[in-house]
Amino acid sequence: MIMIRKATFEDAPALADLSGQLGYPTSPAALSARIAPILKSQGHAVFVACAENDAVVGWIHAFVALRVESDRFAEIGGLVVAAPYRRSGIGRRLCSAAQDWASQRNLGKLLVRTRIGRTAARPFYESVGFTESKQQHVLEKRL
Ligand SMILES: CC(C)(COP(=O)(O)OP(=O)(O)OC[C@H]1O[C@@H](n2cnc3c(N)ncnc32)[C@H](O)[C@@H]1OP(=O)(O)O)[C@@H](O)C(=O)NCCC(=O)NCCS
């Protein structure tokens, strides 16, 4: 049976392992350092999906996005389910946990940005109720 719960600092190594499957390979130490302020912040939430032995098999990060020009909204920063556990409803449950968290904060919208090459992501998000609102260019400048 799969359980959804809030992530704790002790989950950092498992989150790091799954981050690799999301395309962001990272060390447990680096992820620990990054997740500390996230877990402390009221404006962020990380939920994990655990299998029987409490092994973490998926995670989702949602946060409150603040903008000058529009009302605050919730955004999904990352979502991944371990490859052997996909297509069994875990992504849907993680998304639902993020959605409930956002609704409890009276956020009127949950947004996700997903890379075009992620083949599973678009049909997944559509199947859990998201619709495309726009396409964007993403640019960055190294500092
Ligand atoms: C996208 C992802 C999180 C989905 O997780 P999941 O646990 O497999 O999703 P679910 O089992 O809850 O799927 C719910 C529905 O979404 C749709 N769906 C999910 N994966 C799909 C795929 N590969 N192709 C087509 N539809 C898919 C289906 O309608 C599915 O329902 P069904 O299995 O009854 O047909 C997972 O594939 C993943 O981790 N992918 C790699 C990382 C990634 O792309 N993350 C999103 C980045 S923003």
Image (cartoon, rainbow, N blue to C red):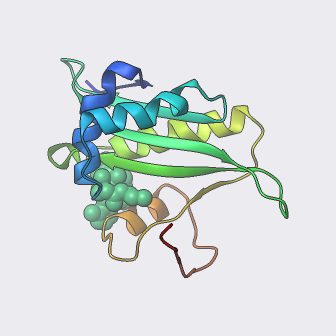
For the image, the number of numbered tags is 0
| 107 shown above or below 141 | above
**Quarter of the image where the N terminus is located:** top left
**With respect to residue 73, does 90 lie above or below?**
above
On screen, residue 92 versus residue 67, left or right, reads: left
Task: Say above or below: 15 vs 138.
Answer: above
Name the side, left or right, on which 75 lies relative to 32.
Answer: right
**The residue positioned farthest toward the left in the image shown:** 84
Picture coordinates of residue 113 (x, y %)? 52, 65
Kindly identify the residue that appears in the image at 26 percent across and 34 percent down: 28
Residue in view at x 78 percent, y 57 percent: 67
Q: Residue at x 21, y 40 (%)?
A: 17
Decide which of 94, 36 is in the foreground and name it. Answer: 36
Q: Nearer the viewer, residue 1 or 78?
A: 78
Image location (x, y in percent) of residue 3: 35, 24
Asked which quadrant contains residue 69, the reply is: bottom right
